[in-house]
Image (cartoon, rainbow, N blue to C red):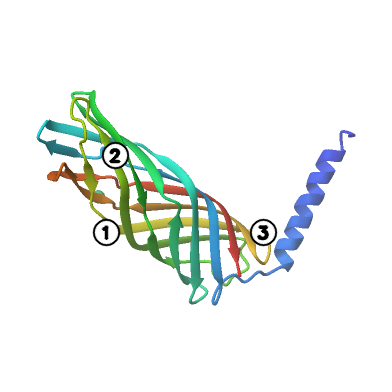
Amino acid sequence: MRKTALPTLLAAGIASAAFIASTQAFAYGAGDFFTRVGVAKVEPKSDNGEVDTALGKFDVDVEDDSAFAFTLGYRFTDKLGVELLAAEPFDHDFTLSAGGAEIANGSTDHLPPTLTLQYYPLGGTDARVQPYAGIGVNYTRFSDEEINVPGVPGASLELDDSWGAAGQLGVDLLIDDNWALNAAAWYLDIDTDASLNGDDIGTVEIDPVVVMAGLSFRF
Ligand code: NI
């Protein structure tokens, strides 16, 4: 390629992108049904609390996990919508430790469906960058809780369902009438009451940030 070809191509590309941007109005907004699909990473906050068990008090550390996730949503108006976050179950490993030494470990699955009411400040305009923010509620259901405590065979852990507040930020980069690149993040207040062999041992605070990257599609 000649030395001048690349800048020329770039200039042509920028010019045509500007032309498309100025002449196409996708008018995302009122009446749109949409779905977003991608990979979501659930990253619990760093301090997940302390449990008080018959064996002593232990610090809880819940690790992160990534899974396929998707959302379904609807825009009532150009600027207001609702979105439900769904996913395949996330599987988190955790450890219990005392004085920095690991005492026990385990894992749990969870499903954290989250419903948010959303505001799209540029909804209904020609803007190809469409940010949004939402607030709502999270419900998290735990399943397949497992714990291995050395020297205590058959220990059983149970984590109660959690209801909590949720916040969300996201952005769509519109590609055409149906598709957009999407990045989104949720903050979820997930606190679960834990019991070990039937005894209450306290509350585990997971309070994760969920980060998702993928595609948006509107119908
Ligand atoms: Ni919390």
Picture layout, residue 95 above or below residue 114: above
Measure the C-alpha gap from mark 1 to mark 3: 36 Å
Picture layout, residue 103 above or below residue 42: above
Q: Looking at the image, which residue is at 68% across and 63% down? A: 176
Left or right: where does residue 206 sit relative to residue 20?
left
Left or right: where does residue 147 sit relative to residue 34?
left
Q: Out of 151 and 94, give the one closest to the viewer.
A: 151
Q: Is mark 2 within 8 Å of ligand 1?
A: no
Measure the C-alpha gap from mark 1 to mark 2: 22 Å
Q: Amino acid at mark 1?
A: Trp
Q: Say whether disc 1 or disc 2 marks the residue closer to the N-terminus.
A: 2
Rendering quarter of residue 128: bottom right
Pinpoint residue 208: horizontal percent, then vertical percent: 34, 46
User: 10 Å neighbourhood of mark 2: few (<14), some, or many (≥20)?
Assistant: some
**Circle 1 SS class:** strand
Picture layout, residue 94 above or below residue 158: above
User: 10 Å neighbourhood of mark 1: few (<14), some, or many (≥20)?
Assistant: some
Instruction: Name the mark on residue 175.
Output: 3
In this view, the mark in front (1 or 3): 1
The reply to whether dot 1 and dot 3 touch (C-beta < 8 Å) is no
Pinpoint residue 150: horizontal percent, then vertical percent: 22, 25
Label 2 belongs to which residue?
146
